[in-house]
Image (cartoon, coloured by chain):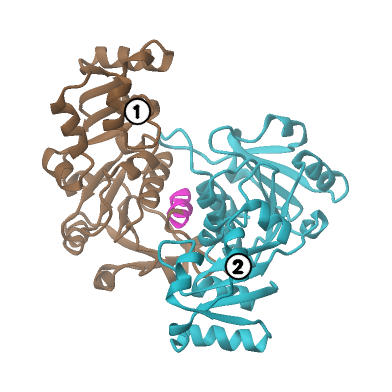
Chain colours: A cyan, B brown
Amino acid sequence: MLSQKIIKHLEKLDKKKYRAESKEFIVEGIKGVTEALKSEMEIALIIMEGNRRDESEFASIIELAQEQEVPVEFCGRKDVGFIKNTDTFPGVLAIVDQREIDLEDLAEGPIICLDSIKDPGNLGTIIRTADWFGVHNILLSENSVDPYNSKVVRSTMGSICHVQIFESTNLHRSLETLKNKYEYKIYSLDLNGKKLSTLKPSPKTVYIFGSESHGVSAGLDELIDERYTIEKKGEAESLNVGIAAGILLSKI
Amino acid sequence: MLSQKIIKHLEKLDKKKYRAESKEFIVEGIKGVTEALKSEMEIALIIMEGNRRDESEFASIIELAQEQEVPVEFCGRKDVGFIKNTDTFPGVLAIVDQREIDLEDLAEGPIICLDSIKDPGNLGTIIRTADWFGVHNILLSENSVDPYNSKVVRSTMGSICHVQIFESTNLHRSLETLKNKYEYKIYSLDLNGKKLSTLKPSPKTVYIFGSESHGVSAGLDELIDERYTIEKKGEAESLNVGIAAGILLSKI
């Protein structure tokens, strides 16, 4: 049985403000917890439904946790109501420390920059796709969805543990620094640029994606070196931002 | 005010069985209804919130509807509770006839085939992306989500009106027909194929995508001419099916 203290802590971790204060977040499910254990992330605690501890995937998690001296608490059916984030509690979750990432940590290799992305599923899918293509630097604007939101974490399918996310408090200034101090080029993907097929990828590039409804913020215009567009042959008015990012990532 | 008959009809159109019987579906919102009016789809009725009829986008819809002799019924605030599919009724919806599509209608140009896709958002996004790239032939397996489901329709952002969807009752047989009678090649996208960069697109090709959890059904193996894989450079285990379809569509 879980202590009241842990249950309270888990409940509070559902709130952005508390996650920001405690610098922790929750990863749920076998895949997510396993990826967290295999990654460089620090894990504060694993919570597992006790009656599943003998199932092979759960047993492997316990073994990995023991190797790394990560504590595992078992919970009963009764606790599940308190701790589940999804309708069906997947039997295991981990409380994971958010990595402290500075802007200069990103300044190596291409950077995916997301400006005002509000949809958790889109952000999660972009992180997962970036991870697939080996792009590990993610720069988020100040008004984007919290990357440690449970829906985002879930839709990254464990990839949240493989990327470095810098949450800017002033994207304009962050981009300026990348440009001036680290000699990055700033490219944006929007509807009025050069053909994406003419893009010559180079490592020191920031690729900016704006929100589906408003595109890249006008305030960033002066910083953008080139604009690219995914060539359209049909009638749809726009592409989903996750799809656009996926297509770009497949090219760089 | 809407008649009880119309309100009942709208409520029932929320059910797959009734949609299949009536061969109709609902398109919501300014963008969706405008696209439906501009497309070849037949529209049975447009329903609009009366007190918005003077707003310019609503007025344009009324004008387009009049040109095409599509009836428009106005409704009041009170009716909205009955008819809304989304939390905020976007002020206008259309009852649209499902186009009758035969397999042979698809047999021109590339075909996107979706095997057991259950997630409405994924299906909608794939339809929208296919439309962007000018691929208008969609073949759905018997156990996929209903393409006229309100969530699918919404996430196509109007593109549902630009594509031809054939809902197979036996995907194996449909693919056999495309192969033998129409000389199509069958390519699948999965995790153990040749590099996607080696793909040479040709118009008479069916591209199959399987479900995220189970991939392309094993029963279709014998029909598949080539398997392709999106090259992975990082650590993610898989790509979202919508992203995979987007990357393939950008190449063909």
Residue annotated with mark 1: B35
- Look at the magenta stretch and give its main secondary structure: helix
**Which residues lie in the magenta part?**
B243-252
Residue drawn at the location 31% of the way across and 12% of the way down? B63
Quadrant of the frame with the N terminus of chain B:
top left
A67 versus B250 height, above or below: below
- Most extreme residue toward the left, as rendered? B21
Q: Of A49 and A65, which appears nearest the observer? A: A49
Residue drawn at the location 75% of the way across and 42% of the way down? A171
Check if residue B248 falls in the magenta segment: yes
> Does label 2 lie on the same chain as label 1?
yes
Q: Of A107 and A24, which appears nearest the observer? A: A24
Label 1 chain ID: B
Q: Position of residue A28 (x, y in %)?
A: 53, 68
Residue drawn at the location 49% of the way across and 63% of the way down? B230
Check if residue A146 falls in the magenta segment: no
| Image position of A154 (left or right of B152) | right
Decide: few, some or many residues near mark 2? Use Cα within 10 Å; few <14, some 14-19, many ≥20: few
Residue annotated with mark 2: B233
Local secondary structure at mark 2: loop
Q: Three-letter amino acid code at disc 2?
A: Lys
Residue drawn at the location 57% of the way across and 64% of the way down? A132
Q: Of B170 and B21, which appears nearest the observer? A: B21
| Image position of A11 (left or right of A19) | left
Q: Position of residue A134 (x, y in %)?
A: 63, 64
Label 2 chain ID: B
Decide: few, some or many residues near mark 1? Use Cα within 10 Å; few <14, some 14-19, many ≥20: many
Q: Earlier in the sequence, mark 1 or mark 2?
A: 1
Query: Does residue A46 appear anywhere in the picture?
Result: yes
Closer to us: mark 1 or mark 2? 1
